[in-house]
Amino acid sequence: MSDKKIRILIADDQNLFAENLKTVIETRADDMTVVGIAGDGDEAVRMAKELWPDVILMDVCMPRQDGVKAIREIRSATTRPKILVLTTFGDDDYVLEALKFGASGYLLKDISMPELIQTIRGLGSGTITMSPGIADSLLRTIDAGRSSIEGRTQATGREGAGTGSEEAKSVPKWIDLLGRRERQILRLMAEGRNNYDIGSRLGISEQTVKNNVSSIYEKSGIHDRYMIIKEAERMLYLLEET
């Protein structure tokens, strides 16, 4: 067995939590060493490039640059470190974006230390690991979104039967319910941008973006970011800015 230790970078703006986590990891796992602690997303990106860790434990909500954006930037530069999200935020949007940009797992901070250590050791298997509650919530959301799309597709097909208009069959009616700002946001979502990026692009707050996304969910009946993006991707021509 190799004597090489697993090099870990912790990215978390709660310094006390990060320092305690470092101490516990190095005390309980003699095959691991914490090579650094980053206090925000920008620092996480820089330290990932400088320290070449094997594993990054990444929080999602941090100043200057959030964890999801940091994951994307790190992944655009290298595939080396396994990135494991460790956070208190279990929102489906965060989970989907983190996994989309290359996270190897998504865990809540209430995980036990033995479970966390075991998860870190198992990252090389290529299996995506999620806290049970996160996985259950995500599956329910995706199933609900899929059922909503299937139901609306069948209804649209019946309404358009015999008209000979394939375009009429494929365009959901809820698109007409969206306001100009909601269309702008949906288009940017389809381009792969997260809420922070969208807010910066449009000159509005991240909270305003979230409010508009919630409105889009309500009007479309699709309460899942991944599924709404898949819908938007096939009708981008309807979302052109006017």
Image (cartoon, grey):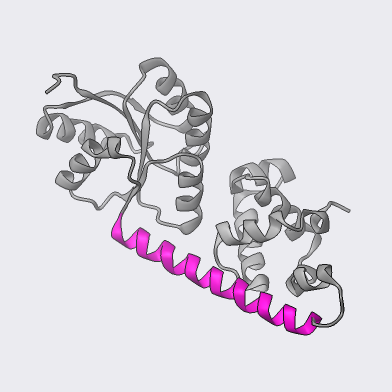
On the picture, is 26 further left or further right than 67? Answer: left
Residue at 67% across, 75% down:
153
> Where residue 70 sits in the image (x, y, percent)?
49, 33
Q: How many marks?
A: 0
Magenta span has 81? Answer: no
Residue at 48% across, 69% down:
143
> Which stretch did the figure color magenta?
131-160
Residue 15 picture quarter: top left
On the picture, is 65 further left or further right than 228? Answer: left
Magenta span has 148? Answer: yes
> Where residue 63 sits in the image (x, y, percent)?
49, 37
On the picture, is 47 further left or further right than 162? Answer: left
| Secondary structure mainly formed by the magenta segment | helix
Q: Is 10 located above or below residue 208 in the figure?
A: above
Q: Nearer the viewer, residue 64 or 26?
A: 26
Residue 36 picture quarter: top left
Residue at 77% across, 54% down:
236
Residue 135 picture quarter: bottom left
Q: Is 189 located above or below residue 42 in the figure?
A: below
Q: Nearer the viewer, residue 156 or 191?
A: 156
**Farthest top residue?**
50
> Where residue 151 sits in the image (x, y, percent)?
62, 79
Residue at 14% across, 45% down:
114
Q: Is 46 located above or below residue 210 in the figure?
A: above
> Where residue 116 sits in the image (x, y, percent)?
22, 43
Q: Quadrant of the N terminus?
A: top left
